[in-house]
Amino acid sequence: MKHKAIFICAAAAAFLTMAGCGRHSAGVARPGQLTLGMVTDVGGLGDKSFNDSAYRGLLNAQKSLGANIQVLQSRSASDYQPNLTALSEKHLDMIYAIGFLMNKDLDQISKQYPKQHYAIIDAVVDDPNVVSATFKEEDGSFLAGALAALVSKTHHIAFLGGQDIPLLRKFEAGYIAGAHQIDPSTKVDVKWVGSFEDVAGGQELANVLFNGGADIVYAAAGKAGIGAIDAVKTRANAFVIGVDSDQDSLAPGKVLTSMVKHVDVAVFKIAQAIQQKKGLKGHLIFGLKDNGVGLTDFEYTRAIIGRANIERVDSIRDDIVSGKITPPSTPQDLATWKPVKL
C-alpha cells in the first residue's frame, strides 16, 4: 500500500448553522462547487479536541478552496451509519468519517456507494474509494514525555487515557519513553477513563493521579480530558498536557503544552487533492517529520519551562526527525525500548 506524508497550514473561517439537530451546512452548493461532508465522532463539535480539529480543516477548505461544507454530528455510535448514509445520498465530492470507531460502518457504506469518495481519520479501511489518514502519535507524545520529565519537580508524572485501545497505547508508549529518555527513574502512573466523553470521570481520575504524587498529567482522552484540565486549575505546582487541539488557553499557565494532532491538516490536504482532481488512494501517514503532530509554542508557560528545557525538547525533536530516535508505538516496543545515547 502506498504511503504519503503531507502537511499544510490550516485556518478557521465562519460558518452558517442550519436548523436541525447536529447539522451544520453552508447552504445549497453552486454548480461545480467543491462539496464536502463530515460525520463527527461522539462528542461532536465543541469538544475542544479531536472533532474540533477536524472541523478546522473543513472550515479551511471552505475559506481557501470555496468548498460547500456539511456536517452531521454523532451523538452515539448508532448514528454513524445513518449519518454516513444521509451524506452519501447527496453524492458529495468527499465525505469524511472522523474517528476509528467508524471503520466498520464506513467499510459497509463504502461498498454500498462504490462511486462515492470517503476519507477516514485514525483508521485504515482498505476499500478502493476510501483514503485513510493516520498519525504517528508516538512522535509528539515522546516530546510531551520528555518535556514533562524536564519540568517535573517530583520525578513522578502520569498518563490519563480515554479508552484502553491500540491507538491510545501509541500515546502512552511515546510519552513514557520520552520521559525515560530524559530520566529513566521517572515514575509514570497510568489510568484509563474508559470513555472519550466522560468529563466528570476525567476530572475524578486526574485528581486521583495528582493526589498519588504526580505533578504533571498528560490527558489523551478527548473531551474527557477537559476534566483533567478542570482538576489542575486549583492545584499549585501541577500541570496538564493537552491533546489533539491547542488546549493551552483553557487554563493559561496550567496547561504546560498540548500535543497537537493536526487532523485539520489531513482534512484540508485531502480536500485540496479532490479539488485538483488528484486521485488520492490508500494510506496517508502524518508524523513529526511532516509537522502532522507536535507540541504548541508554550505561549503561557515559556517562563515556567525555561529556555534550556525548550532547547532540549527542540533537540530531541530534531533527533526524531533525523531518525536517531524512534519512539515506541506499542507496549511491546516500549518493553524493549532503551534511552538513546546522543
Image (spheres, grey):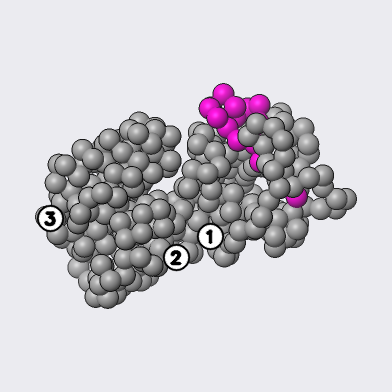
Residue in view at x 78 percent, y 36 percent: 90
From this viewpoint, is residue 209 visible?
yes
Q: Are marks 2 and 1 in contact (CB under 8 Å)?
A: yes
Residue type at mark 3: give it. Thr
Q: Which residue is mark 1?
A: 5
Q: Secondary structure at mark 3?
A: loop
Q: Quadrant of residue 140?
A: bottom left
Q: Quadrant of residue 160?
A: top left
**Where is 25 relative to 279, above or below?**
above
Q: Quadrant of residue 246?
A: bottom left
| CA–CA distance in space, label 2 to label 1 | 9 Å
In the displayed structure, does residue 331 sit left or right of residue 298? left
In the displayed structure, does residue 340 sit left or right of residue 170? left
Residue in view at x 21 percent, y 38 percent: 208
Q: Is residue 330 magenta?
A: no
Q: Which is more toward the observer, 97 or 295? A: 295
Residue in view at x 77 percent, y 32 percent: 89
Residue in view at x 59 percent, y 49 percent: 55
Q: Which residue is mark 2?
A: 289
Q: Which residue is mark 3?
A: 154
Region of the chain picked out in magenta, as a range: 68-83
Q: Nearer the viewer, mark 3 or mark 1?
A: 3
**Where is 69 relative to 148, above or below?**
above
Q: Are marks 3 and 1 in contact (CB under 8 Å)?
A: no
Question: Residue 27 at what x, y percent from top left?
Answer: 78, 45
Q: Nearer the viewer, mark 2 or mark 3?
A: 3
Q: Secondary structure at mark 2?
A: helix
Q: Which is more toward the observer, 296 or 201? A: 201
- Classed neighbour count for the residue bearing mark 3: other residues with Cα under 10 Å, few (<14), some (14–19), many (≥20): few
